Image (spheres, grey):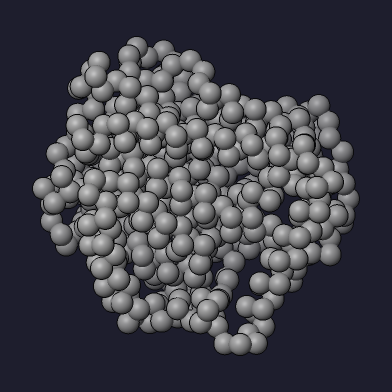
Amino acid sequence: MPNSLKQLIVVWAIGAVIFRLGKPILLRFGSEQDYSRRRNVWFVLTATALLSPSFWLFAFVAAPVLVWAGRKDRNPVALYLLLLHVVPSIPVTIPLPGFNSLFDLDNYRLLSICVLIPAAWRLRKSKISNRVRGMTSMDLLLLAFGALQIALFIPPDLPSHLILQDSFTNVLRRAFLFFIDIYIVYYAVSRGCSNRQLISEALAAFCLASVIMAGIAVFETARHWMMYMDTAVRWTDVVTAGGYKERGGSLRAAASSGNPLALGYLLAIAFGFWQYLQSHVEAKVPRLAVMIVLLLGLLATFSRGPVIGALGIYVVVVAMGRRALPRLLKRAIFGLLIVMLIGQLPIGERFARSLPFSMQSGNKEADYSISYRERLAARSWDLIEEHPFFGDQLALQKLEDMRQGEGIIDLVNTYAEITMFYGFIGIGTFIGLILVAFRRLYRVANAIAQDDPDFALMGFTLAGCIIGTLLMLATCSFILGYVKVFYVIAGLSTAYAHLGKSLKSDPKVLRAVEPSPEFR
């Protein structure tokens, strides 16, 4: 039996079980028709990706399916989040006669072009009264950050050390890619989630996709077998999205995220979203089961930063709600029991051994990792001091001595990376976007906590995910799922804050399924 067919059987089996068990939960937030259509599209695209000999065959099948599903779906944002990692991001260059290339295409851009852009166009013509309209301060901050990315050219890190020159064509390309990669994601989410049910459905769709990836991740680590690596090799002839990475002798799972760190971030955010969604699930078994699967998947990545991020999200969500101290103590005891339970499993023991404080003295891998980060931080700050306002676009060439064994300069801190390339003006617009989102949604959630605890819990959950994201960005570059979900959270926060202003004028806007008694 071909290896790709075996991988398809495994992924389909895990997906089928989770779709079946998760259906009663997902139907609390959306319609059965939308759920069935999204599930069928997921199976079709998964099979096409795992069996297709080239990306272009996948795109030939995926594009019309995505356009059709997007037009049919009542909540295209939920469809987008479910399919965001149906296949890893495996960039394939679009050839253009007379030029080197047009731009790279991957699943992210297919979804933007086929689902989000048509949805955004329909939104502009819609007469929904309670959606965000016009330009907001967050739009302006995002566009300012985009303008810097368009105006300032950062040459790619080429092995030949050749510094490519910028051109007007390249500026237009960067502007177009900023629009489809970043702005359209934020715009479609912030304007498309125009009521509480649509936001809840989007959170649920993301959690469903993440639980599937968590199940695949546990399988990958247990069997030391990457499910999507063969697809990356077939489509590009190089191991890009699924290379085998190990820590402490254990495989670091990536599932369909493309990278263990990216998968860890996605699962940490899903863990945060579940803190709100579980309040609408009365049965204790599914509430606990989803949490355990997400945590096991998180451990399977052997990524310390996302684990800290998930813990931060959990603490923030609990601490912001009503009766914070009793709930925090109760949840702390409950969380400790789960950690002790997982710690008895082989995956828990292996993860514990990978932590810095559990590594034996003189461990070369740990010592090198710590010293590399310290030296990179010092060198980055030197470059920032030399170019504080708009950064140094040739910074990579000046960090050549930091190139490590994998052949890359591993920029492991998003804040340092953005400041180094775009200066304090760049990092100010980047951080300003998410901090404005945090301030607005927290003010709304705090103001309505007494009158509408369910809607407040949704806001506190988004606030916790923002705090967790800010923690995790300090230990990872801005890559893959980090980029997409960062702007998704910003868009959801904008939509939430706008809905909060409608509480008094139109209570129907905030109507939702009643939470279970335990969470009231």
Q: Is residue 169 above or below residue 333?
A: above
Who is closer to the viewer here, 205 or 272? 272
- Identify which residue is drawn at 52% across, 54% down: 471
Q: Is residue 207 visible?
A: no
Q: Quadrant of residue 217?
A: bottom left
Q: Is residue 276 above or below residue 7?
A: above
The percent coordinates of residue 427 (x first, y second) are 65, 40
- Identify which residue is drawn at 39% across, 77% down: 348
Who is closer to the viewer here, 370 or 297? 370
Q: Is residue 156 left or right of residue 222?
A: right
Q: Is residue 16 left or right of residue 159?
A: left
Q: Is residue 122 above or below residue 109?
A: above
Quadrant where the image shows the C terminus: top left
Q: Is residue 229 left or right of residue 8?
A: right
Furthest residue toward left: 517
Q: Is residue 433 visible?
A: yes
- Identify which residue is drawn at 37% across, 32% down: 443
Quadrant where the image shows the N terminus: bottom left
Who is closer to the viewer here, 286 or 381? 381
The percent coordinates of residue 342 (x first, y second) are 32, 75
The percent coordinates of residue 26 (x first, y second) are 23, 45
- Identify which residue is drawn at 65% across, 31% down: 146
The number of discs equals 0
